[in-house]
Image (tube, rainbow, N blue to C red):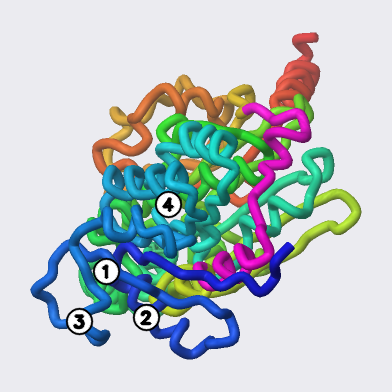
Amino acid sequence: MDTHKQLTIGLFGFGVVGEGLYRILLQTPSLKATIKKVCIKHPGKNRNAPEELFTTDRDILLNDPEINVIVEVINETEPAFEIVSTALKNGKNVVSASKKMLAENLPELLGLQKQTGHSLLYEAAACASIPVIRNLEEYYDNDLLHSIRAIVNGSTNFILTKMFEEKLDFKQALLLAQQLGFAESDPALDVEGFDAVNKWTLLLTHAYGIVTDPQSIVFNGIQNIQSGDATVAAEKHYDIKLVAQAKKLLSGKVAALVLPQFVKADDHLSFVKNEYNGVVIESGFADKQFFYGKGAGSFPTASAVLSDLSALRYGYQYEYKKLYHHAPLELADDFYIKAYISFDDWQYIPKEKFEWIEEWHAESERKYLIGVLPFKELRNNSWWRENKTSLILAPDAIIEDVEIRKIRKKSLELAGIV
Ligand code: HSE
């Protein structure tokens, strides 16, 4: 293997990540990677790089035989997919940070990688600076990976930190996240959980071999969280975080969700503030491991692109081990979740759907309960995120079906019914 391979890069996009990569590469000559051309959309902008580097013609990069790596860090999903797929077909290796494009087109991209034999790496697409994709890919056999819980979106974590610890209001916090280059150009993608579920889709593939459409994972963002929810969280000594989680159940299937959650003070994720991300992995024999690092921003994201470029020098490819070499796992839907739900009016809450309700507080204008629901209720309905209803998972939210059955049996016994 040629470990001294010179990388000649065609870069698509010169925004927060693209420019970050350009600056980082200037400071790392040892990598032997140079950007030959940068394709941009708007030629008129003032850019802090030589003018002759830029073009608006994507074919100049895609058809240049000297360019052996395409780095794609643009904002738009469809052009990103076209660029990445054409580059692979044209015999180039590709590094991408477009999580939405990757998550929505993963089956096709898996096919293209197989068909062309070229490498598509995307470490920057999940948790930016944390090397989580390669870790999940290379470690943690399917049998041993019990669960992963993670904060995968920097902007929402930044907003929650600023709102609840520094008392900024939502708009100010979001504006700051945008100014610092953390937020997506459409910040609804962050705030409403789309970005997090896209990243989770990618991580599920590398963790468990699950290839799924992001829309088939139950998710929500932080848009429904009310100040009263933060008060309840504080009373219980919890933080509120947007948590992506996956847990292997006794059935062998995987429960996966991306929802706000109450996080206990001694949970590793409560340590994750501002634009940082964190990943807690529980696996057989190793017990718990915690990965922590910046999940958004120019240099942290570009550093992940850089590590992919470096990996390309020794011919690294994702093997998708859990998908191709192990028995890939399936998503579960026969489990229960424990959640805190706050709302303005009881009429919005289907009380009969709860397995049980542990707490309820109806005295003030904003009411809340803590109860246990079948997961299918969330998957098949949307009352829990409509009419200003806010659902926040309890800590240890995922409950196995068999646990519920045991509890049901016990209560019938106690009642003298069986
Ligand atoms: N908008 C994303 C975030 C950027 O806030 O996490 C990094 O993927």
Residue in front for this viewpoint, 356 or 287? 287
Ligand 1 near label 1 (Cβ, under 8 Å)?
no
Q: Is residue 328 magenta?
A: yes
Q: CA distance from mark 1 to mark 3?
A: 33 Å
Q: Are marks 2 and 4 in contact (CB under 8 Å)?
A: no
Provide residue 147's location: percent of width, then percent of height. Answer: 71, 47
> Between marks 2 and 1, how big is the CA–CA gap?
13 Å
SS class, disc 4: helix
- Image quarter (top left, top right, bottom left or bottom right) of the N terminus: bottom right
In the rendered structure, which amino acid carries the disc numbered 4? Lys
Q: Is residue 185 left or right of residue 237?
A: left
Q: Residue at x 78, y 33 (%)?
A: 326
- N-terminal of the pair, mark 1 or mark 3, is 3
The residue where tag 1 is placed is: 174
Q: Are marks 3 and 4 in contact (CB under 8 Å)?
A: no
Which three-letter amino acid code belongs to the residue tagged 1? Answer: Leu
| Location of mark 2 (residue) | 166
Secondary structure, mark 3, is: helix
Mark 2 lies on a secondary structure that is loop
* Sequence-first tag of 2 and 1: 2
| Residue 163, visible in the rendered structure | no
Q: Is residue 46 above or below residue 12?
A: below
- Front position among marks 1 and 3: 3
Residue 267 location, x and y as percent? 66, 64
Looking at the picture, does residue 274 appear above or below residue 57? Answer: below
- Residue drawn at x 44%, y 51% is 196
Q: Amino acid at mark 3?
A: Glu
Magenta-tinted stretch: 305-330
Query: Residue beneath label 4, please?
Result: 99
Q: Give the Cα distance between marks 2 and 4.
A: 30 Å
The residue tagged 3 is 51
Between 416 and 132, the one nearer to me in the picture:
132
